[in-house]
Image (cartoon, rainbow, N blue to C red):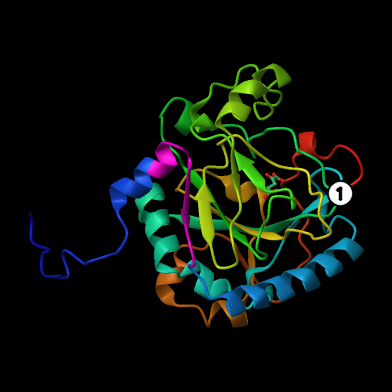
């Protein structure tokens, strides 16, 4: 048995494993960490999200439909109390560096709200696979998800078809929506995720997935953090903003990972990332 080496600056001991993370994202296309955040911290996040959701619903274009009784809202990092803790969590940083390299960029923060009565979404990717993935066989973006409620079977859990980030998409509508004849392949592989408050997960947004029907009385707000490798250009669909006063409070080594604008006053976000194929029915 090999002895554990003494930690030195060259061999820092981290509890996380590079091969395991690479294997998870390049294999199933999904990884998770249980109990990454304290429950009271998540409860504060839910409180912030509930307030931002009400505000967004009142603002034209503030919340985009993602299907019947479902919305997506892109937000300003400083409008949630836990932004800094989220993006400096050692696992989040480790996964970003491992999969996207040392120059990874945070490009999006928002939340999905599947409300009671939300229906099964069509299986989909969040955007078409880029050339880097199709030809280069490389993942150049990740989406972290953090539930703000404990999820149970009747709450329309998120469902994912492991390994499908590599599926060829020439027959997909808009390169994102596979034809219904492909659904048996996803159903055969489907995994329903029922995280608890404090758990965090990460996936390739190309791994085919869907939100399912919410038959409960409870909504299931989930935070989304989008991160790119250099050149992925997903920031073009988003509008990350920081006030100068807030930005100045952030640690220097975090700033190089933020791809957004510094503004005098936060501006309402015009939602750039609509997913046309999900906007069916009334949101
Ligand atoms: O229900 C979820 O957790 C995710 C929904 C989703 O994939 C989407 O709206 O694009």
> Which of the 4 image quadrants contains residue 25?
top left
**Local secondary structure at mark 1:** loop
Q: How many marks?
A: 1
Q: Looking at the image, which residue is at 49% across and 28% down?
A: 166
> Which of the 4 image quadrants contains residue 43?
bottom right
**Span colored in magenta:** 24-35
- Horizontal side of residue 275 vs 202, given as left or right: right
Note whether 270 is above or below 81 in the view shown: above
Q: Within 8 Å of ligand 1, the CB of disc 1?
A: no
Note whether 192 is above or below 84 in the view shown: above
> Which of the 4 image quadrants contains residue 27?
top left
Q: List the single residue furthest toward the front.
A: 153
Query: In the image shown, does 56 or 43 lie closer to the viewer?
Result: 43
Query: In the image shown, does 141 or 7 lie closer to the viewer?
Result: 7
Q: List x then y, in percent, for residue 122.
A: 74, 33
Q: Looking at the image, which residue is at 66% across and 53% down?
A: 238
Query: In the image shown, does 147 or 253 lie closer to the viewer?
Result: 147
Q: List x then y, in percent, for residue 197.
A: 60, 67
- Horizontal side of residue 76 vs 97, given as left or right: right
Quadrant occupied by the N terminus: bottom left
Q: Looking at the image, which residue is at 50% across and 45% down?
A: 141
Residue 103 visible here: no
Q: Is residue 28 magenta?
A: yes
Q: List x then y, in percent, for residue 194.
A: 61, 53
Q: Looking at the image, which residue is at 68% across and 48% down?
A: 157
Q: Is residue 29 magenta?
A: yes
Is the residue marked by circle 1 packed among few (<14), some (14-19), or many (20+) residues within 10 Å? some
Residue 53 visible here: yes
- Kindly identify which residue carries mark 1: 117
């Amino acid at each position: 048995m090999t002895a554990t080496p003494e930690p030195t600056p060259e061999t820092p001991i981290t509890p996380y494993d590079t091969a395991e993370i690479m294997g998870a994202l390049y294999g199933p296309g999904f990884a998770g960490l249980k109990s990454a955040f304290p429950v009271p911290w998540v409860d504060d996040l839910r409180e912030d999200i509930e307030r931002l959701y009400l505000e967004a619903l009142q603002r034209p274009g503030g919340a985009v439909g993602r299907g019947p009784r479902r919305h997506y809202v892109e937000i300003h990092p400083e409008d949630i109390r836990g932004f800094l803790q989220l993006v400096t969590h050692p696992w989040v940083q480790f996964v970003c560096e491992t999969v996207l390299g040392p120059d990874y960029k945070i490009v999006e923060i928002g939340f999905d709200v599947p409300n009671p009565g939300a229906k099964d979404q069509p299986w989909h990717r969040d955007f078409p696979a880029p050339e880097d993935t199709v030809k280069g066989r490389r993942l150049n973006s990740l989406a972290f998800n953090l539930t703000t409620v404990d999820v149970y079977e009747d709450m329309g859990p998120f469902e994912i078809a492991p390994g499908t980030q590599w599926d060829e998409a020439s027959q997909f509508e808009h390169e994102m929506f596979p034809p219904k004849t492909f659904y048996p392949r996803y159903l055969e592989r489907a995994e329903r995720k029922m995280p608890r408050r404090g758990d965090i997960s990460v996936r390739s947004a190309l791994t085919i997935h869907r939100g399912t029907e919410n038959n409960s009385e409870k909504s299931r707000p989930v935070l989304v953090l989008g991160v790119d490798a250099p050149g992925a250009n997903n920031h073009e669909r988003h509008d990350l903003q920081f006030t100068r006063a807030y930005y100045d409070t952030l640690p220097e080594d975090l700033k190089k990972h933020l791809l957004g604008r510094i503004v005098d006053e936060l501006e309402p976000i015009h939602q750039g990332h609509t997913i046309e194929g999900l906007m069916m029915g009334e949101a």
